[in-house]
Image (spheres, helix red, strand yellow):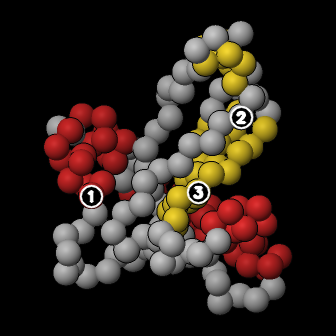
């Protein structure tokens, strides 16, 4: 089988409301999808590949500073959850000689961000992983099981 190699993913970000003020789940999901599509169109028009280029060529110390988040005492960020989707290999892969059956990898927590969810596609399946601050999410496993 193919060796596990995740290349070609691009780093970018979109700020999208999760519409927690809408009680009806179907209506909420529809609104999130509409807002996400609008944010993607605006992103493509406004900044294109700027963040991707910066992440690729920036000095590692600048990237670490960016990922560290705001310094203590800085205003709270506009976000409190990060949700990422990563396209993994489309075919079953091997890792250290063994068949890789699932992929669960999660991103870091940042200052004032209490939850980071990462969805990976792999071999025709999707896998969800999460990292949470216990002060913000007291039952991460229960939250992930409900998804």
Residue at 70% across / 75% down in the picture? 31
Query: Which of 98 and 73 lies nearest the eye of the viewer?
Result: 98
Q: Where is mark 2, residue-wise?
A: 102
Distance CA(mark 1)–CA(mark 2): 29 Å
Residue at 64% across / 71% down in the picture? 139
Residue 27 position in % (x across, y down): 79, 80
Residue 5 position in % (x across, y down): 55, 21
Q: Secondary structure at mark 2?
A: loop
Q: Is residue 116 left or right of residue 61?
A: right
Task: Tell me if residue 81 comes above or below residue 12 in the rendering.
Answer: below
Residue 76 position in % (x across, y down): 32, 80
Q: Is residue 33 visible?
A: no
Could you tell which of marks 1 and 2 lies nearer the N-terminus?
1
Task: Tell me if residue 7 comes above or below residue 67 in the rendering.
Answer: above
Q: Where is mark 3, residue-wise?
A: 130
Q: Label 2 crowding class (10 Å Cα cut-off): few <14, some 14-19, many 20+?
A: some
Distance CA(mark 1)–CA(mark 3): 18 Å
Q: Quadrant of the N terminus?
A: top right
Q: Secondary structure at mark 1?
A: helix
Q: Where is mark 1, residue-wise?
A: 68
Tell me, for residue 109, which label it has, or none: none
Q: Is residue 13 left or right of residue 137?
A: left
Could you tell which of marks 1 and 3 lies nearer the N-terminus?
1
């Amino acid at each position: 089988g193919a060796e596990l190699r995740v290349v070609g993913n691009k780093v970018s970000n979109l700020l999208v409301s999760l519409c927690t003020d809408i009680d009806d789940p179907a209506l909420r999901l529809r609104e999130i999808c509409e807002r996400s599509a609008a944010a993607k169109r605006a992103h493509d028009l406004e900044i294109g590949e700027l963040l991707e280029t910066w992440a690729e060529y920036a000095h590692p110390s600048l990237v670490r500073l960016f990922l560290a988040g705001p310094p203590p005492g800085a205003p709270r960020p506009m976000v409190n959850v990060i949700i990422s989707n990563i396209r993994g290999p489309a075919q079953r892969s091997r890792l250290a000689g063994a068949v890789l059956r699932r992929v669960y990898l999660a991103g870091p927590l940042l200052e004032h961000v209490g939850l980071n969810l990462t969805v990976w596609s792999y071999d025709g399946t999707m896998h969800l992983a999460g990292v949470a601050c216990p002060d913000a999410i007291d039952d991460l496993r229960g939250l992930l099981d409900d998804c």
